[in-house]
Image (cartoon, coloured by chain):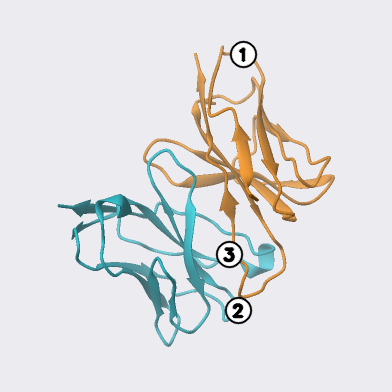
Chain colours: A orange, B cyan
Amino acid sequence: DGGITQSPKYLFRKEGQNVTLSCEQNLNHDAMYWYRQDPGQGLRLIYYSQIVNDFQKGDIAEGYSVSREKKESFPLTVTSAQKNPTAFYLCASSLLARTKANYGYTFGSGTRLTVV
Amino acid sequence: DAKTTQPTSMDCAEGRAANLPCNHSTISGNEYVYWYRQIHSQGPQYIIHGLKNNETNEMASLIITEDRKSSTLILPHATLRDTAVYYCIAENYNAGNMLTFGGGTRLMVKP
């Protein structure tokens, strides 16, 4: 089955440590996205990539880094520079071609990061 | 970017239709309206999308006004499992079809 996989589901880290969240898709989607969600809030865009080896900052990129070495993979690193890293992180992917059958974004099930 | 406005929360009785409104008065003629929902602690799930015409699928119906400034998502027979946050999104065509998620409407379906 095609889909988008995020791992791990729960992650605990000590303050000051970098941590990398995994996101893999086998949908042959062009674009991939990372969102952050805080309790009771909507989704905020961290980074997105529309093509391999290229990515763009979203609204809240400070303290985060990404890479897109393969079409299928878009890992997110939460660095020690991120002031409040504890949050729910969601990865998504999409086609870029605009057709009526383009269902927008497909989301992963998320990674809940807790920094102690 | 076309911005959307939704009520913060709504209640609906189980078995009744849930009608969720959305305003998108600045939407451009070539921008789609998408609806997603997010059940607690899960990733958002696609529901439906449309451009001009009303749309229906196995999950819901989407009614878009003729001037495209607003739309309504209809869940015809709401169940307890439809309790979720519902996001109405106007696609940003000029930013590579970017979807920007706002706060959404928290729908509570009650027995």
Q: Quick one: which residue is furthest to the bottom in this view? A: B66
- The amino acid sitting under disc 2 is Asn
Is there CB contact under 8 Å for labels 2 and 1?
Answer: no
- The amino acid sitting under disc 3 is Tyr
Q: B34 or A24: which is nearer to us?
A: A24
For the point 79% across and 41% down, the residue is A68
**Circle 2 sits on which residue?**
B30
**Residue B5 image offset from top left, x and y in percent:** 38, 63
* A50 sits left or right of A111 in the view: right
**Residue B37 image offset from top left, x and y in percent:** 42, 54
Q: Quick one: which residue is furthest to the front in this view? A: A1
Secondary structure, mark 3, is loop
For the point 38% across and 73% down, the residue is B61
The alpha-carbon separation of the residues under discs 3 and 2 comes to 16 Å
Q: Same chain, marks 3 and 2? A: no
For the point 78% across and 37% down, the residue is A67
Mark 2 nearby-residue class (10 Å; few <14, some 14–19, many ≥20): few
Quadrant of the rendered image containing residue B105:
bottom left
Q: Is residue A93 above or below residue B24?
A: above
Secondary structure, mark 1, is loop
**Residue A97 image offset from top left, x and y in percent:** 72, 68
The alpha-carbon separation of the residues under discs 2 and 1 comes to 45 Å
**Circle 1 sits on which residue?**
A16
Q: Chain of mark 1?
A: A
Q: Which is more foreground, mark 3 or mark 2? A: 3
Mark 3 nearby-residue class (10 Å; few <14, some 14–19, many ≥20): some
Quadrant of the rendered image containing residue B96:
bottom right
**Circle 3 sits on which residue?**
A103
Q: Chain of mark 2?
A: B
Q: Which is more foreground, mark 3 or mark 1? A: 3
For the point 54% across and 56% down, the residue is B100
